[in-house]
Image (spheres, grey):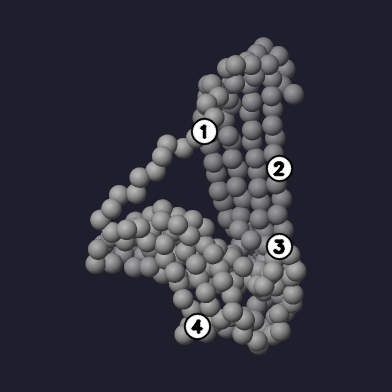
């Protein structure tokens, strides 16, 4: 960019896509690339191609046939700075944010049929928003520091594992004298080339106790 670009709203991608399988997805990621190569994701969106016409009436794809599709990306409020470049990334999967299709998919995209609409804010004008309406905050005291740990591993069999451990901290709700402690463990697993091997496991431990009482 030779000058900053303010983006505010939902980007929309229109294009023509063909799949070699009857069940497929397409994922679009809009990113900003800094001069030093650092990439930050601005927004993303996905479309189950069997829902291309009507989400309530999914229809299998005819392999090899081009379909006109529209992908609405998530809303964003970002400024692309001087020297940054915009990058649009298309893929047929985005594990583990979305569950994979049952078979490996190859997509064909007609670039000459693609149009990306960017929601730009008026140049030289500041966007003013009213104060958001929110409920009064609940009075609470933090009794232990939250902590998060993420790890990844690839086994000899090619199975990839990502694990996340979150200790949300012990919190006391002052209005009722209740102490709450939440700890969660989540694991995602997938073997490369085998979408049906996808697995997810989540364990949450929630302990609550009144002041001076045993945890339940």
Mark 2 vs mark 4, foreground winner is: 4
Cα separation between marks 2 and 3: 17 Å
Q: Secondary structure at mark 1?
A: loop
Instruction: Give me the disc on residue 203.
Output: 2
Mark 1 vs mark 2, foreground winner is: 1
The tag earlier along the polypeptide, 4 or 3, is: 4
- The residue depicted at 63 percent of the width and 15 percent of the height is 177
Image height of 19 relative to 85, above or below = below
Cα separation between marks 4 and 3: 33 Å
Instruction: Give me the disc on residue 134.
Output: 1
Cα separation between marks 2 and 4: 45 Å
Q: Which residue is mark 4?
A: 113
Cα separation between marks 3 and 1: 39 Å
How crowded pointer 1 is (Cα within 10 Å; few <14, some 14-19, many 20+) is rated as few
Q: Is residue 75 left or right of residue 215?
A: left
Q: Which residue is mark 3?
A: 198
Q: Is residue 130 left or right of residue 192?
A: left
Quarter-wise, where is residue 20 in the image? bottom right
Q: Quadrant of the N terminus?
A: bottom left
The tag earlier along the polypeptide, 1 or 2, is: 1
């Amino acid at each position: 960019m030779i000058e900053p670009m303010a983006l505010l709203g939902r980007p929309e991608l229109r294009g023509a896509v063909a799949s070699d399988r009857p069940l497929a997805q397409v994922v679009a990621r809009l990113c900003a690339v800094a001069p030093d190569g650092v990439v930050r994701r601005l927004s993303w969106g996905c479309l189950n191609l069997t829902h291309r016409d009507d989400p309530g009436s999914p229809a299998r794809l005819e392999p090899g046939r081009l379909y006109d599709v529209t992908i609405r990306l998530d809303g964003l409020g970002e400024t692309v700075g001087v020297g940054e470049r915009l990058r649009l990334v298309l893929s047929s999967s985005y594990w583990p944010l979305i569950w994979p299709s049952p078979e490996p998919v190859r997509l064909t995209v007609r670039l000459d049929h693609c149009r990306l609409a960017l929601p730009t804010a008026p140049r030289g004008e500041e966007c003013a928003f009213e104060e958001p309406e929110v409920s009064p905050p609940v009075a609470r005291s933090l009794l232990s520091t939250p902590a998060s740990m993420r790890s990844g591993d690839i086994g000899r069999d090619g199975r990839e594992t990502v694990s996340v451990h979150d200790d949300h901290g012990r919190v006391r709700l002052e209005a009722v004298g209740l102490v709450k402690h939440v700890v969660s463990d989540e694991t995602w697993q997938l073997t490369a080339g085998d979408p049906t091997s996808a697995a997810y496991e989540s364990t949450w431990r929630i302990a609550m106790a009144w002041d001076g009482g045993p945890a339940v």
